[in-house]
Image (cartoon, helix red, strand yellow):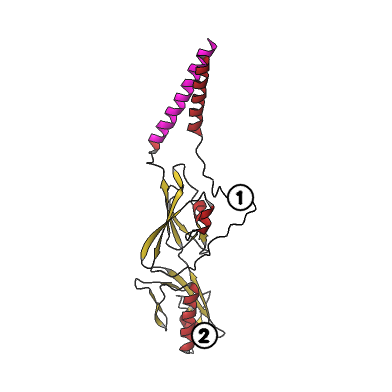
Amino acid sequence: MKKYLFFTALISLFSLHSCIVSKKVVYVKDMQEGVAYPTVAAAPIRIQKNDRLSITVSSKNPELAAPFNLDIGNYGIDADGQANIRSGQSNNTFLVDTDGRIDYPIIGSLNIEGLTIDGVRDLIWENLVNKKLIAEPIVKVELINVKITMMGEVSSVGILDIPDTRVTLLDALARSGGLTANAVPNKVSVIREENGVRKMYMNDIESTNLFNSPTFFLQQNDIVYVHPRGAVPSAREENTLRYLGLFTGILGIVLTTLVLIR
């Protein structure tokens, strides 16, 4: 009888412990020390509709580059009719429209959807040189709206702004506070738009296979969704279950102790 009560006490202790301790996710837990794990090559980021680009043109002769850097307050015409930059640095921004084009000063409309950052730079450079607008221009192009949407079982749901344009799936999860206790670590999906259609890629963040995923390096406008184990209880329901388990565990221990000492 006492042996039975002893096991009952152990079960009660386990119930009490389970109410306090949450399951922890171990990232790439099959990774071994000293073993090299190559990652898939990061695909170059390609321009999409609604992207924002910062494009700056410079030259040995600032007056030649000024018309292509039309910042309000920076660009002006002096008394001799010459273009000049009044103050500060140019920071032109261009929104890629629904047709995948931008309207660039003097050059006109440019179709840049699907091009890489280097491709946009080369396109503008070629137009400046071939149209004899600037002999030796220096063109700088930056993508300034790299955003990743984080959804599902992450601690902080929302949109991540990525200033350096390069982020891995693990980086994004870390910036979102990691996974919740209700997350399924082998069901982390990335939804990506490719050639006008959306595709979903499934990832297991507990496996080193993650390094070979085409979505290990995220791209602008990717959606990361961490699947739940089941329906998530409300805060009130969660507290009720926690306190009920705590009460049951303590009651079991007390009753078992009283029986054993009698």
Q: Determine the image quadrant of residue 94.
A: bottom left
- Position of residue 231 relative to residue 256, above or below, is below
- Between 24 and 60, the one lying in front of the other is 24
- How many neighbours does mark 1 have within 10 angstroms: few (below 14), some (14-19), or many (20 or more)? few
In this rendering, the answer to whether 10 lies above or below 142 is above
What's drawn in magenta, residue-wise? 237-262
Q: Is residue 250 magenta?
A: yes
Q: Position of residue 224 (x, y in %)?
A: 43, 55
Q: Nearer the viewer, residue 28 or 22?
A: 28
Residue at (44% x, 74% y) in the render = 115
Residue 211, given in percent of the width and then of the height, sits at 53, 57
Mark 1 or mark 2: whose residue is earlier in sequence: 1
- Give above or below for 159 relative to 61: above
Q: At label 2, which amino acid type do we have? A: Glu
| Element at label 2 | helix
Q: Which disc is residue 32 wearing?
A: 1
Coordinates of residue 132 in the picture (x, y in percent):
48, 90
In this rendering, does residue 13 appear at all? Answer: yes
Q: Depth check: give the residue in front, 136 or 214.
A: 214
